Amino acid sequence: MNRLFTCLAAALLAVSAAFGQSRVYTFTDREAYLAGELCFYSLFCLDGEGHLSGDEAVAYLELVSADGTGAESKAGLIGGRGSGEFRIPANLPTGNYRLVAYTADGELVTGSSRIISVFNSASSARVDGGVEIVANTPENKLPEASSGDFSITVKQQSQKGKDLVLYIANPPTDMDLAVSVFVEDMMPHEDNASIKAFPVSGGAAQKIGRERENEGEIIRGTLTGKAGYLTEAILSSVDSPADIYIGRSDGLGSVEFNTHNIYGDRELVTELKLREGDNARLELVEPFVRPSAGEMPVLRYGKDITPDLILRKTALLEGKAIKLDTLLRFLPRRESPLLKSGSIKNYHLDDYTRFSTIREICTEFVPELNFSRQGGRWMLRMTKRDATDSRRYTFDNVLVMMDGVVISDHSMLEDFDAMLLEDIDIYTEGVVLGQIPFGGAVNFITRKHYVTALHFPDNVRVIDFKGVSYPLAYFGAVPEGKDLRPLLYWNPSLLLNKGTDVRIPITTPQYSGTFRVVAEGLTSEGLPVRAETWFEVD
C-alpha cells in the first residue's frame, strides 16, 4: 500500500512538473514604435504541453534593455489568455528592447522574449552599445501575398481614406487569434519568431518561484515602524467599491492581500489595526523581478528613416489629443465578487434638498441609514424592512465607504462637507469581507474623489498604485482630423468558429504606404497557428 501511494505521489509530481511551470508568449500590435506611442499586447500563458494554462490570473511584463527596465505592465489572465497596453516612455532611449512576460509561479524565458525597436525622435539618447548608424537602413521583409496556416486575404491595392475588407475564410478548426494591421514603413525592426517556435519547456529559463496567483494579483507589503501586534490590515481602492481586501499577516512584518485584480492606475488606501501605542506603516513590495535583457541585437538605421519618423511623430502628437475611450473597446475582465449580489439603491443628492452634514441627509431622506452614539462616538447603522414591510431590522455592522475607500471610524463622516457629495449607493444585501460579515454596505460618492482629502489617522496611508491593464481592442475607428494612424486594427482575442468566414472592415489612412496583416494564435486543440499578408495604399 505504501508503495502504491509512493507511485501515485511520484506520478502527481511528474504531472505537476509538466503542466505547472507556465510560460508566457507575447504578441504585440507592431515591432517598431516611437517613444511615447502605445504598445498593445496579447498574451498566451502556456503549460509544459503547449496548452493554455488556467492556473494563473495575472501576468507581468517588463520592457528591458542593457540599460535596465524601461517600462512595465500587468495583465489579467482568463483561461490562459490576457491582453493590455502600456505607453512607451517619452524619454526612453533609442534601441532594441525585450518585452519579457511571466507569471508568479511560472518561468521567464528571456532568449525567446519578443524584441521591439524603439525610436526617440526628441532625444539623441541611445541604448548603451545597442545602436549603429549606417548609410542605408536595412529593408524590412514582407511576407508573400498570403501565407500561413489558414487563409487571410485582402485587396492588395487600395487608395487613401477608403474602406476595404479583410477576410479569414473557412478556418479548418476553432481558433483564438490576435490580429494586427499596421504600417510597414522604413522603421527597422527584428523579425521575431512566431508562437509556433515558442519553447513551452526546456532550455534556459528563470523560475520566478512565488506563490501561484489563482484569483488575481497578490499585493504584498512590509510593516515599517513600531508594530508589536497587527490585528487587521484593510486595503481599498479609490473609485472601486468592490476592490476591498483583508490582509493576512505572517506575524513577522509581512502582509499579503489576495485580490481579484485591481485594474488601472489608482490610489490605494491601506489601514492597519494596531495595538494601542504601536505606530507602523505599510510599504508595498513591487512584484517585478527586473530581469536581464541578455544578448541583444544591434539596431541599425540610417538617415533615410527621417520622413517616416516625422510622419509617426505627427500622428503621435495628434493622437494624444484623442480620448482613448472614444476609439478603443473594453474586453471582458475579472471582476471582484464582493458587491455582485443583491440590489443597490441610489440617492442622487442633486434631486433632494441639500444639507451640510451627512447625518442631516440620512435623517431627512435616507430611511435606510441612521447615526447613533456608541461609546461616545458616532456609528452609522442600517435599517431594513421585511418582505411584508411590517418589521424593521437594524444592523450595527455596516461596511461604510467613501469613493470605495473603507471608513472604519464613522465619526470621520461627521465633519465632512456634505455639499461635496454627489451620490449615496446603498447595498441592502449582506456582504462578507474576509471572515467578517456585514449586514449591508454604503458608499458615499463625492464629486471629484475628495475622499483622499479626509484627515485620516496615522494608521491609514494613501498609495499610488499601478494596477492591471484594462484589456482593450481597437477595431479601426477613424479619429477626427487628418488620419495618420500607423495602427489600423488590433484585436487581441478574435474567436473563430470552424468553417465560418470572418469579415473585418478596415479604413485606410490618409497617407501612402505598405500595410501588414499578421494573425497568431492557438487552435481549440492547442496547436499554434500563424498567417500574414500585406497591401498597398496609394
Image (spheres, rainbow, N blue to C red):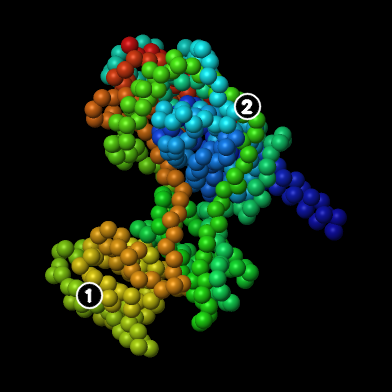
What residue type is disc 1 on? Thr
Residue topped by disc 1 = 357
In the image, residue 291 above or below residue 117:
below
Q: Amino acid at mark 2?
A: Ala
Task: Indicate the quadrant containing the N terminus: top left, top right, bottom left or bottom right.
Answer: bottom right
Judged from the image, the secondary structure of the residue bearing numbered disc 1 is: loop
Q: Residue at x 34, y 15 (%)?
A: 512
Circle number at residue 197: 2
- Residue drawn where x is 55% and y is 71% of the image: 225
Give neighbour class at mark 1: few <14, some 14-19, many 20+ (Cα, 10 Å). some
Q: Position of residue 204 (x, y in %)?
A: 71, 36
Q: In the picture, residue 515 is in which quadrant?
A: top left
Q: Is the residue marked by circle 2 packed among few (<14), some (14-19), or many (20+) residues within 10 Å?
A: few
Report whether residue 177 is seen. no
For this rendering, which residue is in front, 341 or 128? 128
Disc 2 element: helix
Q: In this rendering, would 228 be left or right of 170?
A: right
Which residue extends farthest front? Answer: 124
Residue 411 visible to an observer of this rendering: yes
Choose mark 1 or mark 2, whichever is in front.
1
Quarter of the C terminus within the rendering = top left
- Kindly identify the residue that appears in the image at 46 percent across and 48 percent down: 468
Foreground pick, 134 / 488: 134
Which quadrant of the structure image shows residue 207?
A: top right
The residue depicted at 44 percent of the width and 59 percent of the height is 463
Q: Height in image: 385 above or below 132?
A: below
Query: Percent from the top left, x then y, of residue 336?
Result: 44, 57
In this view, the residue in front, 219 or 123, is 123
Query: Is the C-beta separation of discs 1 and 2 under 8 Å?
Result: no
Which of 373/388 is in front? 373
Q: Earlier in the sequence, mark 1 or mark 2?
A: 2
Image vertical order of residue 251 relative to residue 485, above or below: below
